[in-house]
Image (cartoon, rainbow, N blue to C red):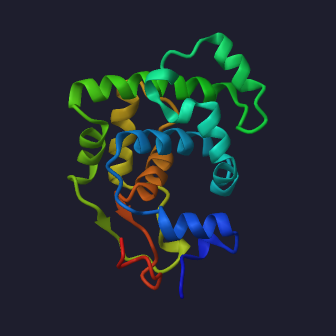
Amino acid sequence: MNRCAWCGSSKLMIDYHDKEWGVPLHNDKKLFEFLILEGAQAGLTWQTILNRRENYRMAFDNFDPGKIARYTQKDISILLKNAGIIRNRLKITAAITNAQKFLAIQKEFISFDKYIWQFVNHKTIKNKFKSLNDVPASTKESESMSKELKKQGFKFVGSTICYAFMQAVGMVNDHFTDCFRYNEV
């Protein structure tokens, strides 16, 4: 069974690749989770974040944007002491800001799903990559998404982070063409 080479031999990464990565996602809470985790990944590997995902869920109230949007300086201090997450003040405060902006988007567009999927015309872009060398770091769609999210006030949403988000939530199918998941998603 062929898989995308990036998942390596880690059981956690293989399970993530086989069950989650690239599957079109339309649940607002899960989209928010991926937005926060992709921002936390900046400068790190996905394996690093995936290893800490359960800790993030506990530390960030199971990614409830309503709760996170109300975090105070006391909450930030507690998070900065939590060894189970990436203890970066900018990333933590970005998660709070992003929760606030996420709620504003939901209010304006009825759902974050409706808003975010507009960047791919509400359907998955199916790429035909054969290796990691073929996969771009960003695209015109991720650049557009990044620009608009920044305009809305979101943080840690550069074009590369947006493209990784798009891959994770199935806005693009970047499974390699010889991967067993390519035609499944």
How many numbered discs? 0
Q: Quadrant of the N terminus?
A: bottom right
User: Relative to residue 137, is residue 90 depicted above or below?
Assistant: above
Q: Residue at x 58, y 67 (%)?
A: 15
Image-quadrant location for residue 138: bottom left
What residue occupies the far top of the structure in this picture? 73
Locate residue 27 relative to residue 40 in the image: left or right. Answer: left
Residue 4 in view of the camera: yes
What residue occupies the far bottom of the structure in this picture? 1
Locate residue 118 relative to residue 179 in the image: left or right. Answer: left
Image-quadrant location for residue 174: bottom left
User: Relative to residue 23, is residue 80 depicted above or below?
Assistant: above
Q: Residue at x 65, y 49 (%)?
A: 49
Residue 84 or 123: which is nearer the viewer? 84
Residue 154 or 106: which is nearer the viewer? 106
User: Relative to residue 134, is residue 28 depicted above or below?
Assistant: above
Residue 42 in view of the camera: no
Image x and y of residue 3, in percent = 54, 79
Image x and y of residue 137, in percent = 50, 57
Q: Residue at x 47, y 61 (%)?
A: 20
User: Relative to residue 155, is residue 25 depicted above or below?
Assistant: below
